[in-house]
Image (tube, rainbow, N blue to C red):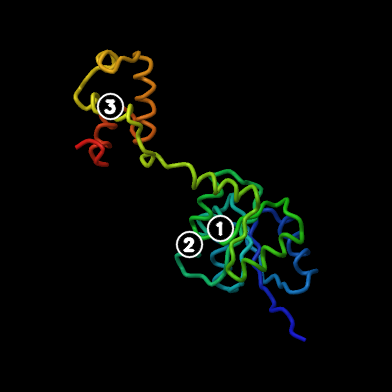
Amino acid sequence: MTTEPLITLLIVDDHPVVRDGLRGMFESAPGFRVLGEAASGPEAVTRAAELDPDVVLMDLRMPGGSGVAAIRELTRRGARAKVLVLTTYDTDSDTLPAIEAGATGYLLKDAPRDELFTAVRAAAEGRTVLSPAVASRLVQAVRTPAPGNEPLSAREREVLTLVARGTSNREIARELFISEATVKTHLTHLYTKLGAKDRAAAVAAAYDRGILG
């Protein structure tokens, strides 16, 4: 009979009670061994180098140094360990940087015990694990065009061309047979799509992208 390989862990969290809870949970389950703990990002990097775990369970927001910075450093060093983020936070400002830094997975602390065990096993094999809430956020982020990547409408191009000629809002309105308020709305959309803060920056960005020749 073959036995599953033992998965070794490093638990990183600034709250001792959380570390104790996770250690007790994994040590009571077959197939896992907790090699050590860390209370900050920098300590996690040091301990990971010393212990060489299969998986690092990483909290993100810690007073002694962030988890994202630690993930980035582990990735830079080519650490063998896979990082599974385990945090309370699922905002874009937490999720995306952690994934971009090299995290293999991202779970929230309210995940059921069995889901956490499954996620650690998957992470150890290099498979990506995301909580449903995080997965939907990532999909939304991918689907939302970044500033400067969204195509301009035909009317927005017309407005932009006139802006590049130094035409005032009032003159643009008269030439295109629209109201000045509509011109301002088009300009607002142009600034967003081109990642610009004013008329001059919008024109410069348009030339840079080849929209204006």
- Against 38, is 54 above or below? below
| Residue that appears at 78% across and 64% down | 24
Answer left or right for 60 relative to 209: right
- Against 181, is 88 above or below? below
**x%, y% of residue 176?**
28, 18
At label 2, the amino acid type is Glu
| Residue that appears at 69% across and 53% down | 15
Marks 2 and 1, the one that precedes in the sequence: 1
Residue depth check, mark 2 versus mark 3: number of the one nearer the observer: 3
Q: Nearer the viewer, residue 15 or 92?
A: 92
At label 1, the amino acid type is Gly
Q: Nearer the viewer, residue 24 or 94?
A: 94
At label 3, the amino acid type is Glu
- Against 45, is 61 above or below? above
Q: Quadrant of the C terminus?
A: top left
- Toward the right, the furthest residue is 28
Marks 2 and 3, the one that precedes in the sequence: 2
Q: Are marks 2 and 1 in contact (CB under 8 Å)?
A: yes
Answer left or right for 24 relative to 169: right
- Toward the bottom, the furthest residue is 1
The span from disc 1 to disc 3 (Cα, nearest Å) is 51 Å
Name the mark on residue 73. Answer: 2
The quarter holding residue 113 reads: bottom right
**x%, y% of residue 194?**
34, 36
Name the mark on residue 41. Answer: 1
Q: Nearer the viewer, residue 120 or 158?
A: 158
Name the mark on residue 158. Answer: 3
Answer left or right for 19 relative to 80: right
Q: Are marks 1 and 3 in contact (CB under 8 Å)?
A: no
